[in-house]
Amino acid sequence: MIRADMITTVGRTYLTSNIENDEYSYPKAFTAASLTFVPIRNSAGRAFEKLDIRFVKDNITVLIETKPNFTKSDEEQLSAYVEYEKALTGNKTIAILANTANNNIKVWRGVVSEGDYMSKETALRSMDEYVDFYTSKINDKEKVMQNTYKLNELLHRHSVPEKLRSQFVGTCLLALKNGLEYSTPSLTAAQIRARIKEVLEDLLNSDINKAEKLALLNRNVLGDQYIRQLTIAAFREILKFIEDNILPFINDKSTSGQDLLNLFFVTFNKYVGKADKNQAFTPDHITDFMSKITGINKHSVVLDPCCGSGSFLVRAMTQALDDCATAAEQDKVKKNQIFGIEFDENVYGLATTNMLIHSDGNSNIRQGSCFALADWIKEAKPSIILMNPPYNGQRIHLPQTYVSTWARDKKEDPSKGLYFVKFIADTLNSINHQAKLAVLLPVACAIGTSGEISRLKNEILEENTLDAVFTLPSDVFHPGASASACCMVFKIGIKHSDVSNPDTFFGYCRDDGFKKKKNLGRVEQIDPITNKSRWSEIEKRWIDLYRNRQAKPGESAVHKVSGDDEWLCEAYMETDYTKLTEDDFQKTINDYLAYLVREGRTYES
């Protein structure tokens, strides 16, 4: 393929200038940006400085190096350009070797490494399609949700219990992704289970907790009596459905693929039994938002002390890997910078599987109570904490020193999860380690101005800062849990009273562009005018207001607060009267009348 055809295919509109002798000059670009250019050289001492073709759209850069043949040296050269691009712009990259003698290409999403190589990419695409490698595809998400619903019905028909379904399907998905063969006629169900176990052993080969995790998956999944009773026909039907209707949507080499995988786990866990309804699995777009507002990058050390299925850890890893310029940096992130703790043994198995699907050794995920792992947390020294603690923690979930302060008839955590924040903050403050913490908590924690919640709010602010609070949609966990939640952001190790601190930012984020849809939960919507995801535009708006600490009527407020105050935007935000409608007025009247009925009062009284 000739150069002109390559430019036409990707899009001349996005072709960048700064050309010397028909090539893009990185030394010249670094000088223009007032940066020092340090050339990367090959073993012969040759410096790599000029790229053949470069395209940019938004924060995505496509790099094309043309060659008559592909050699390992060419990959080293292309890898150098990815490093330059990261240092110059910080953009996410698509790196391509294009053959000038034929139409052959090699494509990497991210760094030029075996892990990021996209073997199925055999033809050049448009720039918009390459941007899609890093963005969510709404229609695909909805399709996965529809297929997950059908899979749930299939598992129900074959008597697989609700509480087992997510872990079983995740284990099957992991095995299929890694080449499980199950269609040979002579195979028995027991032999398929044995083959799945072999896949798990290979994947956990370098994991120091291998034996523990294998024992857990064998006991709770492969060895479960309901899985052992599956006939070979039923087992094959389930595996075939997953292979045909779930696996094609899972691409762990793209951000959209990782979004879809998290969506799969979250969607599937909407079908748990009533006993598990208090487990609020965080929607993927909220994990994405919290990862962005905390500024996760390749240097971040991330901890989720209540990691559940691992959605925060996967999202954090995705964002950190996208910031990496080399395979070595990616390996460092996976091995040394992602930490998780999960109390529930079954859910811990789900987190292990989730991280394995994302090609991570997951050796830094522990099963147990975060309160018993304080020393481990101190050793990790996380710079970012993302968490969604249990809101109705039982006595067994919390330390005895705290439980002993409860009233004798109290069965659930009176702090609604706020104690988890206090514990993590105290743990890090004990070693004088500063960090940023973003947590999902029920609105009751934000509006509480008395009792246990008020006491903890004041104690937290003695050594830490309340940086921001975002009011989230009231049905954000629908249909899994009914809690109305907010996202609080704290700066750990910086006193709230510090005079250099800006006032707390409050965001009113009730509308995230998602709508309820029967059997599918909350579904992302497309703007009919722009034909883009409503959420992507809304998220950008939320983040911009927060970063600029901007007060906007009807959207946000900036206010100085103490532990005795309400921590919610509604208490401080000005009303935008230009957006009020007759429907808003009628809804307010209806709500007031409903309140009078509930209270047994009349209008006159």
Image (cartoon, rainbow, N blue to C red):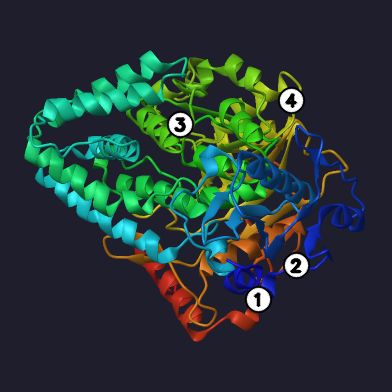
Is residue 26 rendered to the left or right of residue 216? right
Helix, strand or loop at disc 3?
loop
Disc 2 from disc 3: Cα separation: 57 Å
Are the residues tagged 4 and 1 within 8 Å (C-beta)? no
Mark 2 burial class by Cα count in 10 Å: few <14, some 14-19, many 20+: some
Query: Which residue is denoted by mark 1 in the rendering?
Result: 576
Badge 1 or badge 2: first in the primary sequence: 2
Give the residue type that dot 3 points to: Asp
Mark 1 or 2, closer to the camera: 2
Q: In what element is the residue under mark 4? A: loop
Mark with earlier residue (4, 1): 4
**Which residue is at the front of the view, 521 or 532?**
532
Judge the density around disc 3: few (<14), some (14-19), many (≥20) Cα neighbours within 10 Å. many
Q: Nearer the viewer, mark 4 or mark 1?
A: 4
Residue at image x 50%, y 80%?
585
Q: Amino acid at mark 4?
A: His
Q: CA distance from mark 3 to mark 4?
A: 27 Å
Work out whether residue 564 can be spotted.
no
Q: Is residue 561 above or below residue 204?
A: below
Where residue 451 sits: x, y (%)? 56, 36
Q: Which residue is mark 4?
A: 433
Query: Can residue 274 be seen at all in this image of the molecule?
Result: yes
Q: Position of residue 378 (x, y in %)?
A: 65, 19
Decide: few, some or many residues near mark 4? Use Cα within 10 Å; few <14, some 14-19, many ≥20.
Answer: some
For label 2, the residue is 16
Q: Which of pointers 2 and 3 lies earlier in the amino acid sequence?
A: 2
- Residue 297 coordinates in the image, percent (x, y): 67, 42
Residue located at (52% from left, 37% from top): 313
**On the image, numbered disc 3 is attached to which residue?**
413
